[in-house]
Amino acid sequence: MERDVAVVLSGGAVNGVLMELGFLKRLRESDLWPRVGWIYGTSSGAVAGTMAALDMLDDLEDFMLRLQPEETFRPHSLWRLPLLGSHDYRLPETIAERLGDLVPLARRLAQAPIEVTVFATDVSNDAHGEGARMYELAYSSRTTPPETMAQAILASAAVSALVLPRPVGDRIATDGAWVRNFPLGPAYGQPGVELIVSFRYLPNYPHFGAEGLARFRRRLERFPKIPPVKALAAELREAEERVERGEPAHWADMIVRLMRVAIQQNTVLEERMAQDKDEALVALEQLRQDVQDIVRREGGRRGDRVARAIDEHFASAKFPFLGDRLIPRIAVQSSAGEVSLETGLRNPKPWSEEEKRLLIARGYGLLDEVLAERRVA
């Protein structure tokens, strides 16, 4: 069967991986799956998309059902925060222990019938780029060396608010959500794509309250005569006051707020550009037909000749969106709903298997509803 379907998966941390797992399991059961030729994913979408292309969704499900917060991003001691970020990136080691080294998997991925492209953000000192692709790194499983591809998948999922960037080949890269959280544009630009199936996770960002700061300050105030402790307690009190005023409590809170702005903005722009392009193509085609009809109807004996000349002018016009095709899309977007597993909290509660299965079922059910409406077997 000809492969003419592209899958697009957004970032979304642990909630995103679980919901995308359910989404992909439902897609695998449909008539569309043998037609999938490309998967574009960022962050959680990079991980889920890689496992789907390797036909390892069952392995991914087993992995996710066992996974706990400290095995993804483990909090650092407070004194290490200025140097290392707030968390230790444990996910690479956990993947290696339970799924195997990513480099051999990347070698298999290079030979898979589905091409996977993952996205990361370039934060190298000499980072550059042009236009909309500035600071964007895109790694294709067909053209990227397996060692680099393995690094790129892990860098794409390295949440910047928690951990430091990672080396990817000769670049230093971090979470791809900063530049391409929902990689819809590259799917539209891929020759051969006749249908796009997409999942976009709608995040609920954590709110940093002052409770933890207050508890920590009260502990420090037991030692009021030690100057460094007294100074730190005073800084914590100032942080509490900032929270009360609605300001960021600390640098991590500020980074999370900035991520929220950047990721939401680039995601909305990605969808808006695709929608505007589709509407422009439809409107242009309708205008061309209307003009031809008018010319043929009112142009008398020269009507057909003038209509052909007008058609040639339309064909040679240089609009930015010309050359693109109107590609239908089966789109799913959703938040985690009532069940949401948080990543990056200092004392997260354990993730239960029941909660994880509910998120997988949510992703599965959302696509199932859309496929039923489209009457896809």
Image: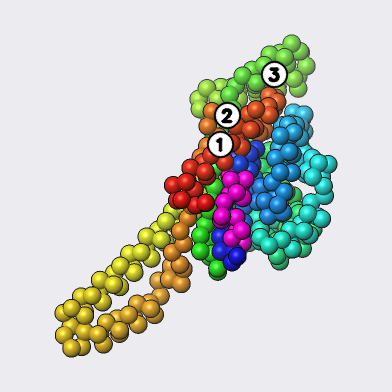
Q: Main secondary structure of the magenta part?
A: helix
For the residues bearing labels 3 and 2, Cβ distance under 8 angstroms:
no
Is 121 colored magenta in this rendering? no
Residue type at the position of mark 3: Phe
Its colouring scheme is rainbow
Task: Give the mark toward the camera: 1 or 2.
Answer: 1
Left or right? Give the position of 340 relative to 90: left
How far is the residue under mark 1 from the one under mark 3?
Answer: 38 Å
Whether residue 156 is visible here, answered yes or no, is no
Mark earlier in primary sequence (3, 2)? 3
Q: Which residue is mark 2?
A: 339
- Picture quadrant of residue 222: top right
Q: Residue shown at 78%/16% (left/top)?
A: 226
Lower position in the chain sequence, tag 1 or tag 3: 3
Q: Position of residue 339 (x, y in %)?
A: 57, 29
Q: What is the magenta range?
A: 23-37
Asked if the residue at tag 2 contacts the one at tag 1, i.e. Cβ–Cβ closer than 8 Å, the answer is: yes
Q: Quadrant of residue 15?
A: top right
Q: Label 1 belongs to which residue?
A: 362
Residue count near mark 2 (Cα–Cα under 10 Å), binned few <14, some 14–19, many ≥20: some
Residue designated by label 3? 216
- Could you tell me the amino acid type at mark 1? Arg
